[in-house]
Image (cartoon, rainbow, N blue to C red):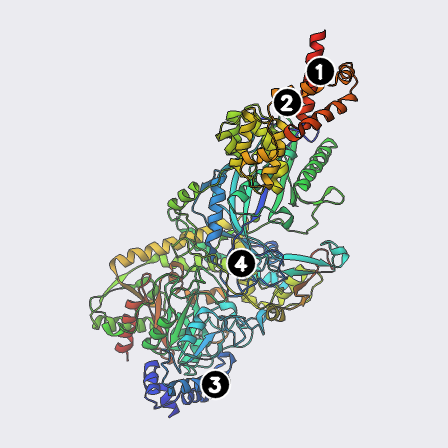
Amino acid sequence: MTYRIDQADVAHIAKLARLSLSDDEIDSYQNSLSRILEVIDVMNSEDLSGFAPMDHPLETVNLLREDLVVPGLDRAEVLEAAPSAEDNYFRVPRILGSS
Amino acid sequence: MNDEILDWGIRELQRRLESAEVSAVEVLEAYQEQIAIQEPEVDAFLSLDLEAARRRASYQDERRARGERLGRLAGVPVVLKDNLCTINFPTTAASKILDGWVPPYNATVVDRLDEEDAIVLGKTNLDEFAMGSSTENSAFKITRNPHDLDRVPGGSSGGSAAAVASRMALAGLGSDTGGSIRQPAALTGIVGLKPTYGRVSRYGLLAFASSLDQIGPLAASVEDTALVAECIMGHDPRDATSLQEAPPQLLGSLSQGVQGIRIGVVTNLIEAANPEVQAGVEAAIQALARAGAIVEEVALKELAYGLAAYYVVAPAEASSNLARYDGVRYGLREPGVTVEEMMIATRTKGFGPEVKRRIMLGTYALSAGYYDAFYVTAQRVRTFVREAFARAYVSFDLLIAPTSPTTAFRIGERSNDPVEMYRSDVCTIPSNLSGDPAISVPAGVDADGLPIGVQLLGPALSEQVLFRAAFVIEEGLH
Amino acid sequence: MSSRTIAGPARGWEYVIGLEVHTELRTATKLFCGCPNAFGEEPNTSICPVCLGLPGSLPVMNAQAVDFAIRVGLALNATIQRSQFHRKNYFYPDMPKDFQISQYDVPINANGHLELPSGAVIGIERAHLEEDTGKLVHRGGGGRIESAEYSLIDYNRSGVPLLEIVSAPDIRDPEEAKEYVAELRSILVAVGASDGRMEEGSLRVDANVSVRPVGETQMRTRVEIKNLNSLRSLTRALEFEGRRQVQLYEDGEAMLQQTRFWDEARAVTGALRLKEEANDYRYFPEPDLPPVAPDPLVIEARRSELPEFLSTRRAQLADVLPELSRDLRETVITDECWPYLRAALDANITPHRAVARCANELVALLDEIGALSPSRFVEVLALEDEGKLGASQVKVLLREACLDPLAIPELVAKLGFTASDADAVKAMVAEVVASCTQEWSRYLAGDEKVAGFLLGQVMRRYGRQISGSDARQALTRLAEEARAESS
Ligand SMILES: [Mg+2]
Ligand SMILES: [Zn+2]
């Protein structure tokens, strides 16, 4: 089955991904993503139901670490590199409301 | 003298340093001069610190004079793809979103090179966040192929490949998610290895697609590539997907040949390449056969599905890996009245068009209603591909195929057509999906003098045999 | 032994409640990095590339967190299974990677249950590992998120290991919800996984609540109330929300599936005005973390190390004292009290007496228990059981046994407790009243005021050999007998 991606889809996924697109960009991404989806659609020409999904090349399990404290980063250095900081905290614009 | 120095491989260089025939500072000066000549044309670097390199070289000379034993890469000028974290250089991933960010820590591979006394010259250009096959998707510059400045060096590790190919460094590190080490190595006429998944720690590699990414070396010769590979491989407790295996002995067995080694020629991948590339691969096959390898043809039609699966899995993981670039803790921040507006403004300004395309593709593939059709199906393809490889490796020790279907293409030629660009990776992607190692080795040039790369593929942990075969091809085609 | 009584939100209605309890695990370090898992430190002092989500950093699982998860799973009678981590993708500034590493379709613990003091059994759907977020501090606008001018972030808590314990929607009233959390808390503390400090946020509760007419079996639209961080808030919020929902149905208004918060000051729940798109978390397997597959041998070892839980103690008490009131039972099965009671029961002390001494005397002495070991406690109770000491003497002796490590017989002597059992005390009192015939007659005639005089005489004569209350009891009994004889 071929999936079609329309402009509303592009706008929706841009929103989920925290990107803002102009109308022209929506247009152009709709175009290119549709072409890519055609390539991806090749997967559906084969019956793959007999193949278990493989999400990772490794088959190992239980790679755990011991519960031991390791020195971390210097706060001053980290906050220095932050776009905005105040009182030893990272600072961000307000969370709720709109402009 | 300088030209002679640039001709030396790593072991040759080590011998000359040990016999005091040359000093590390003199070696550095030779490379400095070469960079002064080549870099303005090639544009391989995003950052370069030759002063620091010189201090390090001079300190090594002092240590050597005191009789200290130095590391296996002492005095060797190397370059790092700019998606590897370094304390001493900014790390940008060729993205505006990280412009100016200096990591507070080194990637594990950077520490390993450091322990072996390599001399890092600088950080090299790439497609933004390693997303691309031409290094044209960098936010900062376009790197050129030293063999033809109008052409791309391949990508995404195009900067490291171009730097090594133009002899501005002896070796480079790249990362390979769908062919990003092997394809630029092929297009610039050098050697590039994608190790078995988990052989090299990913700690400190800016993630593109975590289940596919591997760091690997690029160098002018098989031997230099093997030596750097040995130095960076091995378990790292900071990467839970790092294998517990000790690094393989690659250099020691390099010249053991391929007598009796069974090599499968992947016909359907060869058919996908242009005739000149096919001829290059054929020459490599002949060299292997002459050395006693048993060569047979095999068709692995399953590999053709790899491209489709890759363009689901890689963007899906990338969409999540790149979420953290939100303007809160580091890098770019654009103003916004609310946090959400700030994040949107930052990401919109900070990411380039190809990165946005892949983030959106991956977001789509994971979103409600599409997950099974896209992500899960792509995972089934991974099994499909892996089982095809597994069947092939019952009959063969190694497989051989082109690295890239074409030689280097012109700058701008494919940049408006993502699908055409994606097809550059059709021969390299299957190894990333399966997690197996593969190496690209030069196999002559086409009519325009552009390098052709041949690819050797093997089952997990087969790097030793891969290098032996690669060495045979290198020797045989000389 | 079920004593479950259900109180609906209104006549003819019942609650359907499921709880999600997030508990911080008491590991030394965070879930995926070696930063200290500490509470109350200076902001942003327990941070590293991993828990700040710096580019290139990778998570590595804390073995101790897995171990705690296994212990809790066993305590909740859950199936411990090979589990996979997933990424839950959404943007929020307190979450450094803009995704949370959590567990999705294959949690480490599944299908358990928890038995409450009432006898009700609450299903546990899952108990999975995940990472905590950083903390937001809002500046301006009274420090509230909805009116703040801007916000500050402290990432010390980012990456602290959480176990999210999700109950089935089996809880039927706010009291039961409270009981569930209290019981769960005691288990988490008993296995060492949590310090149980709700006020420090070690235990945070989200409640899913709906209401329906009694008899209806379908679930109706549910509302999630976030961050109920005390037992009091939990019951009050559920009660308010139940009434609110019934009111909406009765007024014929629409019930929206929404997330609400509890406003402690105004005692109401309110809709969270986050302009959230329909939740699409795009879960997918975490490629940086291999699955966790607990070794069956390790699971069995952990099972054998499980501490004794309250439910076990309840069952033991039910065997010897089936009629015991719930209040008394819950008082004596606490970790502080139980060793004394268990020792007394093991020594065949009369169960009722043992429970009474624990619930009345011991509980009051817990803060100063000092020298009173379970065996000394049993020794004292045995004296009472054998009739050698009276009740009020025992009370004095127990207090003394806390303060003075002297052997019990010597303590008895030191206190001068020679006379003891009720008959002996009665004889002493009888002797005294015989010498005060006038007052005795007035007392028998109903003049209560004269009792003080008579008791004063008794105490003057026998001092500490008997206690005042024993003497008063004896006096009452003598009077009853005398009246019975004369009538
Ligand atoms: Mg959760
Ligand atoms: Zn940390």
Q: Which residue is denoted by mark 3 in the rendering?
A: B55
In this view, the residue in front, A29 or C140, is: C140
Instruction: From the image, state whether disc 1 or disc 3 is nearer to you.
Output: 1
Q: Chain of mark 4?
A: B
Q: Residues within 10 Å of mark 1 (few under 14, many from 20)?
A: some
Give the CA separation, mark 3 to mark 2.
Answer: 99 Å
In this view, the residue in front, C334 or B166, is: C334
Q: Which mark is residue B320?
A: 4
Q: Chain of mark 1?
A: C
Q: Residues within 10 Å of mark 2 (few under 14, many from 20)?
A: many
Instruction: From the image, state whether disc 1 or disc 2 is nearer to you.
Output: 2
Give the CA separation, mark 1 to mark 2.
Answer: 14 Å
Hey, what amino acid is under mark 4?
Answer: Ser
Q: Which residue is denoted by mark 1 in the rendering?
A: C479
Residue B427 screen position, x and y as percent: 38, 65
**Disc 1 secondary structure class:** helix
Q: Is residue C408 left or right of residue C446?
A: left
Q: Which residue is denoted by mark 2 in the rendering?
A: C425
Q: Are marks 1 and 3 in contact (CB under 8 Å)?
A: no
Q: Residues within 10 Å of mark 4 (few under 14, many from 20)?
A: many
Disc 2: residue Cβ within 8 A of ligand 1's nearest atom: no
The answer to whether dots 2 and 4 both sit on one chain is no
**Disc 4 secondary structure class:** helix
